[in-house]
Image: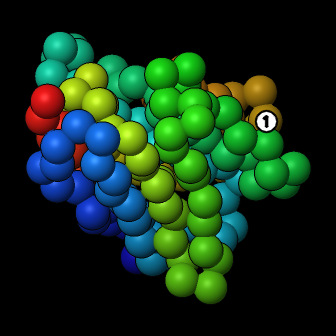
Amino acid sequence: RGQLVESGGDSVQAGGSLRLACVGSELIKPMTCLGWFRQPPGLEREGEREGVATTYVADGSISYADSVKGRFTISRDNAKNTLYLEMNNLKPEDTGMYYCAAGFLERQYCGLSYWGYFGFKGQGTQVTVSS
């Protein structure tokens, strides 16, 4: 209980697509804020992650990093207790370890810069995009 487990990472060519999934063992449905973060190869500092997409469940608002807008889509399936990240037109700069996160956050903290505020985080799934 209380775990997030990501899957779906893979090695793909630029222009390809992947769908990441995060199974939440009863965490996804009750949380106020859900998100995807990544650690690209150049971001080595412990505890730092780059925000990819977050959603504030109460009003359905979604934030995307500028670099992924129009290519990535965050969604959730409460019945399956799963959070998804659909990634299309992948680019080499999308390479990294992708983490899902969940938390009881107020709307102002449900954003791309608040990785440290999320109470539940997965172990990550690796995405590698080659040119």
Residue 103 seen: no
Q: Residue 56 location in percent, x, y?
A: 74, 46
Residue at image x 15%, y 22%?
A: 41
Residue at image x 34%, y 53%?
A: 17
Q: Which residue lies furthest to the bottom in this view?
A: 79
Report whether 22 appears left or right of 104: left
Occupied quadrant, residue 127: top left
Q: Which residue lies furthest to the right in this view?
A: 59
Report whether 93 appears left or right of 103: left
Report whether 101 appears left or right of 28: left
The N terminus appears in which quarter of the rendering?
Answer: bottom left
Occupied quadrant, residue 35: top right
Report whether 96 appears left or right of 119: left
The residue singled out by tag 1 in the image is 107
Residue type for callout 1: Arg
Q: Residue 16 location in percent, x, y?
A: 29, 48
Alpha-carbon neighbours of circle 1 within 10 Å: few (<14), some, or many (≥20)?
A: some
Residue at image x 60%, y 66%?
A: 76
The C terminus appears in which quarter of the rendering?
Answer: top left
Residue 19 seen: yes
Q: Which of 18 and 55 is in front in this view?
A: 18
Give the total of numbered labels.
Answer: 1
Q: Residue 50 location in percent, x, y?
A: 40, 24
| Whether residue 127 is situated above or below residue 75 in the rendered picture | above
Occupied quadrant, residue 78: bottom right
Q: Which colour scheme is used?
A: rainbow
Query: Secondary structure under badge 1?
Result: helix
Q: Residue 28 location in percent, x, y?
A: 58, 67
